[in-house]
Image: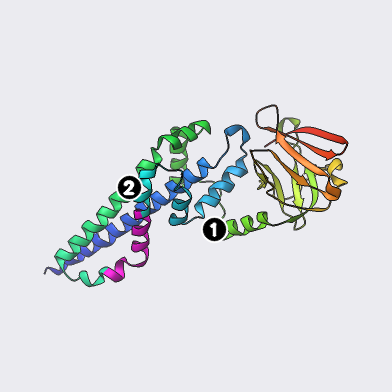
Amino acid sequence: MDDQLNDELIRDLYATFGLAYYQSECLHRGLCIAHAYLGLPQADFLTGPRVEELLAHSFSLTLGEVAEKLAGILPAHWNIEIRKAVEIRNFLAHHFWFDRAHLMHNTNNIRLLIAELQGYSDKFDKLDIQISEWSKLKEKQKQLGISDEALQDNLMKILAGEDEEPLPDKKTVRELEKKLRNKQRLIRVWEPALEGGSRSLIFELADGTLWQLSDIGLGQTRFEKVGRDWKENQTIRTHLPTDITPHPKCDSPWDYEFTLASNVVLWVKPGQKKKTFKWGLRLPPERVGNESTSG
């Protein structure tokens, strides 16, 4: 056997393995994006941090986890193919080199391995294209106001190294999700001035972290610290501090309640105008209401 030819074949083998694994990553990302987009409410109920929160959650899932979450959402005939793709991805990640190493000393066997890997690569690529071109996902993108041109422009910025700050890593996402599942001590509610003179509500917890309202309760905010010109909401202040459930029962977007001290209820509902919410305190028999931007 020609040693030079063998070296070239082995390099081709490694390159084809890399391509197959890369295509599995593309499929993984495509499924994560689909999972995030389909979990978003309509555009009028969205906030920027909430989109980032859902994307970060989706990207923290393994290929198997996101495939399982989409099992009842994707077309039924895709599920078998995607489950098979998960098995292949796991095989490549954990078993391929151990199971196939003994075949790398023969030219014909190496060619067979390259063909096997190319088949895996094609399978991942085909599924990724199906997901990205899925009519339900395209319709959701349209509803959210995300055009193909915007996606392409964002891709070009990423390739040019102009990407925005990366999303939180898996560990950070898991810690945040655990935090929001448990009771938290609410100590202050602030009203920062926004563009146009409107005000929003920013919730400060006992650990000093800041949160804003989202479609399902407390969500992440881009504010990292209390601003000098912020005003503490005096109406809510009299019913703090208190322990709240960050993600209370929520049957529809922007429709939920927080129970404050003395069983006073802070209710939240969609506003009359787009991208606004209403809130008020239920102080039987008195009820105080305000309108504020959803950010």
Q: Nearer the viewer, residue 166 or 123?
A: 123
Q: Residue at x 49, y 45 (%)?
A: 35
Residue at (61%, 44%) from the top-left corner? 50
Q: Amino acid at mark 1?
A: Lys
Residue furthest toward the top? 273
- Please tell me whether residue 9 is drawn above or below residue 257 in the rendered image: below
Residue 291 location, quadrant: top right
| Residue furthest out toward the left | 1
Q: Which residue is mark 1?
A: 170
Which portion, as a residue range, is magenta? 84-99
Tell me how many marks there are: 2
Position of residue 163 measured from the top left corner of the image (x, y, whole percent): 51, 46
Which image quadrant for residue 257?
A: top right
* Label 2: which secondary element: helix
Q: Main secondary structure of the magenta part?
A: helix
Q: Is residue 204 left or right of residue 120?
A: right
Pointer 2 residue:
125
Q: Name the quarter where the N terminus is drawn.
A: bottom left
Q: Residues within 10 Å of mark 2 (few under 14, many from 20)?
A: some
Front-lying residue, 249 or 30: 249
Q: Are marks 2 and 1 in contact (CB under 8 Å)?
A: no
Residue nearest the viewer, comparing 262 with 173: 262
Residue 183 at x, y = what percent? 73, 56
Q: Is residue 167 left or right of residue 216?
A: left
Residue 93 horizontal side relative to residue 279, left or right: left
- Nearest to N terminus: mark 2 or mark 1: 2
The label shown at residue 142 is none
Depth check: 30 or 267 in front? 267
